[in-house]
Image (spheres, rainbow, N blue to C red):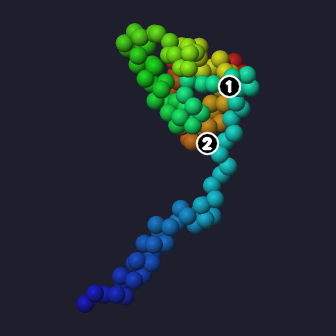
Amino acid sequence: MYDSGKIIPGLIIFVLFITIPIWYNRGGAGTEPPKPVLPKDAKTCVLPAAEIRAEHMKLLNVWRDEVLRDGQRAAVTVDGKEYPKSLMLNCMKCHTSKKQFCDTCHTYASVRPYCWDCHLAPVE
């Protein structure tokens, strides 16, 4: 009535199919995360390191919208230090190498940011 001759092999095939990523990835051992070249002279950033790693794309989009669409060009003040709302005038002053800093993480994450569609990439 339940046709267990088809259900049990079907469940085994289903479990094997669902766990293929685990077997393919050798038990979950992924590749080594990137180690971008950090600036040596700068000790602070607009946000703490963990936040800027996770939220930099949102921050840059907010700055873009505020500056280009709303005309709000006032600098951001964090801990008494002013930061201009600009990729080139702020971020790229410390992170001077796009290849050694930006591209290492973006390649690892398979992300193609559209920053460089408008901005000129720094000369390496």
Q: Where on the picture, by quarter, is residue 84?
A: top right
For residue 87, which numbered disc appears in the image?
A: none
| Residue 107 location (% of width, % of height) | 61, 38
Camera-side residue: 2 or 45? 45
- Location of residue 22 with respect to 82 vertically, above or below: below
Residue appearing at x 38%, y 14% in the figure: 69
- Left or right: 116 in relation to 18: right
Q: CA distance from mark 1 to mark 2?
A: 25 Å
Query: Which residue is identified by label 1?
Result: 43
Camera-side residue: 16 or 39? 39
Query: Which residue is identified by label 2?
Result: 108
- Location of residue 99 with respect to 33 vertically, above or below: above
- Left or right: 35 in relation to 108: right
SS class of the residue under badge 2? helix
Kindly tell me whether residue 85 is visible in this rendering.
Answer: no
Residue appearing at x 40%, y 77% in the figure: 11
| Residue 21 location (% of width, % of height) | 53, 62
Camera-side residue: 24 or 83? 83
Residue appearing at x 45%, y 19% in the figure: 64
| Residue 93 location (% of width, % of height) | 65, 17
Q: Tell me the quarter of the image containing the C terminus.
A: top right
Kindly tell me whether residue 67 is visible in this rendering.
Answer: yes
